[in-house]
Image (spheres, helix red, strand yellow):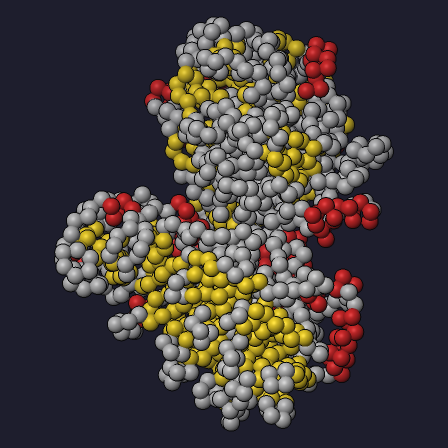
Amino acid sequence: MSPPRLALSLAALLAAGTTAADSGWLYYGGDQGGKHYSTAAVIDRDNVAGLDVAWVHRSGDVERYGEAMQNTSAQATPILLPPSAGESLVYCTPFNRVIALDPGTGEQRWEFDPGIDRRGDRTFRCRGVSYAVEPRVATGAHCHHRLYLATHDRKLWAIDARDGKACDGFGRAGAVELYGEEGYVPGDVSSSSAPTVAGGVVVVGSGVIDFARATAPRGTVSAFDTLTGKRVWQFDPLLGHASSGAANVWAPMSVDEDNGLLFLPTSAPSPDYYGVDRPGDDLYANSIVALDLATGAVRWHFQHVRHDLWDYDTPAQPILFQWEKNGASIPALAQVTKQSFVFVLNRLTGESLWEITEHPAPPSDIPGERPALTQPKPIAPPPLVDSFLIPSNAWGLTPWDRGHCAQQLAALNNLGLFTPLSEQLSLMYPGSLGGANWGGGALLAESGVLLVNINNAAFSGKLVPTPAGAASAAKTDHPESGKRMQVTMQGTPYTVDIGALTSPLGIPCNAPPWGKLIAVNLYTGSIDWQTALGSVHEMGPITAPFHIDWGTPNLGGGIATAGGLFFIGATMDRQIRAFDVNNGETLWKFTLANDATATPMTYLYRGRQYVVINAGGHYMFQRGYGDYLYAFALPE
Amino acid sequence: MRNLYFLPVLCLISAFSHATTLHIMNAAGEPLSRVMVTQTAVEKVVADLSDDGYAPHGVLTPADTTITRFTDADGNVSFDDTAGAVQYRVRSQGYVDQYISEDSLAADSGTESATDDNGDDSLAGDSGEDSTDGDVGEDSLAHDSSEGPAVTTLDVTMVPMTKEQYIASYPSNVWLSKLSLGGDEDLKNSFELNCSFCHQQASPFMRNERTVEQWIAVFERMNSYGARLPGDEHQQLAELLQKEYRELRENPEVVPEPRRWEGHLSSIEMKEWVIGDGFSQMHDFLIHPNGFIYVGDNLFDRLYEINTETGEYTVYKVPHNDEQQPGGILGNRFVTFPKMHNYLGVHSFAVSPRDGNIFITPSMQQALLEFNPKTKKFTTHEMPGGYYPHTIRVDAKDRVWFTLALSSQVAMLDRTSNEFTLIDLPARGVQEWLILKSLPLIFAFDPANRPQPSPTRESIGLPMPYGIDVAPDGGIWVARLYANDIAHIDPETLEVTMIDFPFEGPRRLRIDADGMVWIVAFQDSLLVKYDPKADVFTPYELPVVNEIPYALNVDKERGVVWVNGNQSDTILGFDIASETWKVYPMPRQRFFTRDIEISESDGAVYTTNSHFPTWQSEGGLPTLLRITPLPDQAPQH
């Protein structure tokens, strides 16, 4: 890091008057390295059973936007501002409204509505906002304490953390347009993750529709001056590859300020399932790319999927930690993936700290398609999903639906993990939902134990020759619950057809649990424990009066605390749960108004510990929507 | 070590119309001997693989080839002229693999005189550039074409591995040697017997961390493929494998160094022909008097006819009738395997001394196959009984002998009468006799409803006659794998004599020119000589630790027994006269040798990479490999 930027960074930290370790929650991921860990221990294993609702805040989105809520996904994780910045709890709604609350009561203090352009059919979501002190603005002056927000309609906003007003002098009236001279085109590109702020720059990635067009928009990552919004550098993860696009960074990034490194989790190149026109490995797609924070120059990269044909984006924030081994402490990075591997890298060099075995990959029978011969697989930890699924493993409630599933499996093209799609229906296991997804993992203090929630439901898919003149028919990048997704991949000869592999009863053809919580020991490379995550009692035609803990597909993440607890929603049963980090035992659960497909956070405020989670449902689950923010605490 | 999967990204070497000498040295400039250098064509052959990924029946098809040689005491290794552009992988124990780039050669094409094929350090100029790999570094290059054949000399500096890299590069056998399975030797024997005849154990693919549940799922799947790991061992073995592999990962320094490569290697050349794909299993093969090599793809009912002179091959699909199902009469054991075309199970090969026809055991049928290499036609000889035709030999009287592994018999086809004789080998007890006699009843059931064995460690199953060979006196010798005995059959009277084998796991056997019976003891990691006249067994320790030898063959002309080193990526040569070993490292990691055939005329030794699954082998493709003494180079010791 250059000296001026280092100074800026240190000044910002001092001015903020708080760190991630003092039981606040200053960053989306708990800290800049995405550990999702809190030192707060007021709530612990012994008393968590007494946890109850402290307050509920409703954003008003339901009343304001009505039917448009059906196309939303509530994914926000609030942050708690330091006292110097007003000590508000701040979060964003799917329509990018930023709301500041009293952390003790949930009463609204201010709101900022960027008034986004809501044209197009792209789903609305906002995972969070980022906070920083701008030392070039006088203490006490407006916008000394800043919040940064990247919006659905591709603007980067800087607003004052104390009153929610836009910061003059940042871009144009507080906003920088992230799109180019061509103007904003609804639908193709949006932003959902919180920007990354460090070293005097605010860095923004994007979400790109990467499955509907061969040459999707570029997945450019841009860094802007935190004061002015002037672009400092930008990085195209595909290095200008002309016949592809995307490889964007939609998941949160991580920062190692001490070493001046920014870590990008890059996604798949476009189009997701057809790679004839993008031969080779497609660097730096599907990678963790370490950039020089100050310049954007590539320091190293680690590509975990070569020539992606499965939509195996890097889905989650890289987790920064110290890897303890044989008395040595190595600056490390853990990356969970959709293909269910956990890679542990030296974050200074990108070298894997576990031996990598090259997993042979099956060939493709699509003309001109040349999948990579092998894909990297760490010798440890083990895959979080056993991707081997054969007819004799088919599962069903009855012999009839089990037999049906066995027949489906027998008819599938199934060459194991990394089977490329063909014109014959192929097994996709894990599917594009993962494995792990954007919820990432939570690192349990310095123990090296990573708690990860994963999906464990098989998909099937095929490539269907596209009739002339056909158009894309889907707005989502994954099939919605109970439906198959069919998308014309414009610029290719094919339409992709993907859906969950289920029996006629709509039940997954693989054995439960269909969602799992797994404790992965990164130091030993082993799994300490695993348990089902979620109950299917609300997923049948009628709601069962008791929980059936077979696990459910899940989106969102969890957090670990020094109280020995892991809090998570994410499931398709409207629950938030607290697990014992030592053994996976469920110690507490609460039924919310909607599914909480978001990552919770926790903080200490005036001696009381709160656990907060956004519960607004997820369009993909098709289980209703809402605009709730719940705070839980022990009785006073 | 980096592996050949990365070949597509390797840097390229220009085509030169002359030989190349590589001079390999360490960072101090000292020459490195015993360095393995593999030359590969840059351009892959263009082949019609339109039949499910394989060459169509009867179509002449080019094969990719590689040539591997080793540096001599001066650190030099030479390769002959090539028609096209080539690339080199340089491998030395303890050093990072080097890939020689086009840049290394192309930058300077100055010429100097060369007077011998080995080149000369003094010829190496100082004009090299760093390779694009960045590891070769400080290469220097000279081209010599002023008189005699032009020679390119390339200096390559090897970079030492880190300790971690070096340990990770060890072959499987040394890792396996440190698995004690809780100190339970019987359990380890059972594990090795049941889990090591298809693929290596303790390779990185096996050392992968797995949960206990994942290990048990693997055992169950492997048992469905044909392993017979006792069910009551699954839980214990899963827990021990998880525990001990973790301990090895935590303490890799306890793993012993593999045997160092030796100086004799500079006197040989290894050539490989790539055939099949990552799902194939190249099982047995034979060297035919017509000059072709015939290799059987056990999982795809295909016969490969390879012309080693031209590097071309022709595939012949073994026909099956409409009534036959995948898996034949055994039932499809491979329902879970991704790709399969396995109705007969092309297993073992023997050639008729009378007409050159090839006899093949189809292990999944009650039949014997005959292939006429002139007409390319297959004939099926239906058998009157017997199950699992296994290893096959033809005697001097053109009688075809083969073991029937499941029914514990030996079959003989008299080609004169075209009739089979089935010879029962004795059961070890009444229960076993009853089982053997009830096999026709059991096989009367549809495979899906057939009673399945539930082997335990004490009752692993049937005796399983396995290897077979014909002695110089015409006697037939057979090894029974699970019974730990060998049988002698008088070919005229068909009298059977059973002899206890004092070691574990007699798998295949061969007879030398003096009538000595050589047997590999699978689980005991031994080569055993049996002297029939003296009735004495003599064990010989293998020169590598924890090897699990599958097969062997004897070079009768030179008095050398060749033994699989299928866990150690080696093939082992035992000089009968001196009772000394030579070890030959294979050019690919996870190279599981199975059948070995000898070209008695020139001393060439052939084997196949028969690792199942093949995709775990370095390069991911099966190969036929030939080891040939280099002309004009005296072996070094």
Q: Position of residue A606 (x, y in %)?
A: 63, 19
Q: Position of residue B633 (x, y in %)?
A: 26, 71
Q: Is residue B205 visible?
A: no
Query: What's the residue at 15%, 63% (across, down)?
Result: B115
Instruction: Work out whether residue B618 or residue B447 is closer to the camera in this orientation and state it.
Output: B447
Taking the image as shown, residue B257 lies to the left or right of residue A374, namely left
Query: What's the residue at 49%, 69% (across, down)?
Result: B294
Taking the image as shown, residue A590 lies to the left or right of residue A603, namely right
Which picture quadrant has residue B219?
bottom right
Query: What's the residue at 52%, 7% (across, down)?
Result: A166
Q: Is residue B95 above or below residue A56?
A: below
Q: Is residue B636 above or below residue B65?
A: below
Instruction: Work out whether residue B53 or residue B320 is closer to the camera in this orientation and state it.
Output: B320
Q: Position of residue B575 (x, y in %)?
A: 39, 80
Which picture quadrant has residue A109?
top right
Q: Position of residue A512 (x, y in %)?
A: 73, 43
Q: Is residue B596 visible?
A: yes
